Image: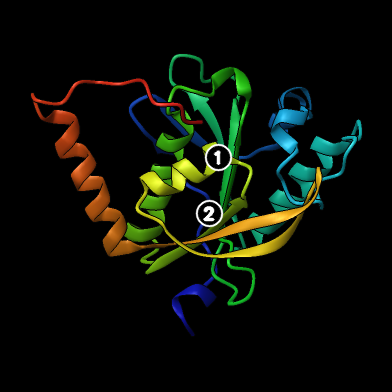
Amino acid sequence: MTIFEKPLPPTPVLETERLILRPLAPADAPVIQRRFPRWEIVRYLNERVPWPYPDNGAIRFVEICEGEMARGEKLYWSIRLKDGPDELIGIVNLWPDDGQSCDMRGFWLDPEFQGRGLMTEAADRVTDYAFRELDWPHLWVSNDDRNHPSARVKERQGARLVAFEPFRSVSGDGRRMVWLIEREAYFKTRATAKTSATSPSETPTNQDCI
C-alpha cells in the first residue's frame, strides 16, 4: 500500500495566525448557500459545479463531503477568521493522488475577504499538514489559466508549472494550468519567504492575492 492509498484520518482543526480551519459540518450549509453562489467564485471552477446553483446545493454538497470524510477519502475544512469564528468565509479541501487527475487540493474564498492573503495563509497551513502529518511527498494542484489569483497562491508555494491542459469550467471551454508542489521545494520557499519578511532591508508591500 502506497502513502496515498491509506485512508485519511478525521479532518483535524488547524490554526494560523489569523484563521481557524474546522472540519466542514452540516451547520455550515446555510452560510455556504449564502456566500458561494456568486459568479466571481464559480466562473473558473470545474463544470461539475451546478450553475445556476440550486436552492439545496449547499445541503447536498455538505452531505457528499461528509460521506467522503467518513470513508477517509477527502478532508474538508471551513475557513474562519479568528476574530469572527462563528461563520465560514470559504472552504479548502485535500485528497490523495489518484495517479490520474493531477489535482489534490481545492479552495474558494468569499470575495469580501480576498486581497488580504487569507487564502494563501489557509493553503499554506493545509499544505504543511499534507507534508508534515500525512507525509505526502508532493501535491498536484491546478487552476483555470484565467484565474490569476489562484495561480499566484501556487507560485508563492514554490509550485512548478508542469502543463496546460484542456479544461471546461462553469464559464465554458478553456485551459487549466497543472502544477506540482514538491515537499522539499515547498519548505525551501517558505523558509526564504520568512527570511525576507523579517529582513530589515525589506519594505512591506500590499500583494494582490486571494
Tag 2 residue: 10
Image-quadrant location for residue 90: top right
Residue 54 is left or right of residue 105, and the answer is right
Name the foreground residue: 17 vs 48.
48
Measured from the top left, where is residue 86 in percent x and y?
57, 19
Q: Where residue 9 sits in the image (x, y, percent)?
A: 50, 59
Q: Amino acid at mark 1?
A: His
Q: Is residue 14 visible?
A: yes
User: Viewed as shown, does residue 61 lie left or right of 141?
Assistant: right
97 sits left or right of 144 in the view: left
> Which of the 4 image quadrants contains residue 15?
top left
Crowding near the residue tagged with mark 2, few <14, some 14–19, many ≥20 C-alpha atoms within 10 Å: some
Task: State the residue position of label 1.
Answer: 148
Disc 2 is placed on an element classified as loop
Q: Quadrant of residue 103?
A: bottom right
Q: Residue at x 77, y 25 (%)?
A: 30
Residue type at mark 2: give it: Pro
Q: Is residue 105 above or below residue 29?
A: below
Residue furthest left in the image: 200
Q: Identify the residue at image location x=68%, y=56%.
A: 175
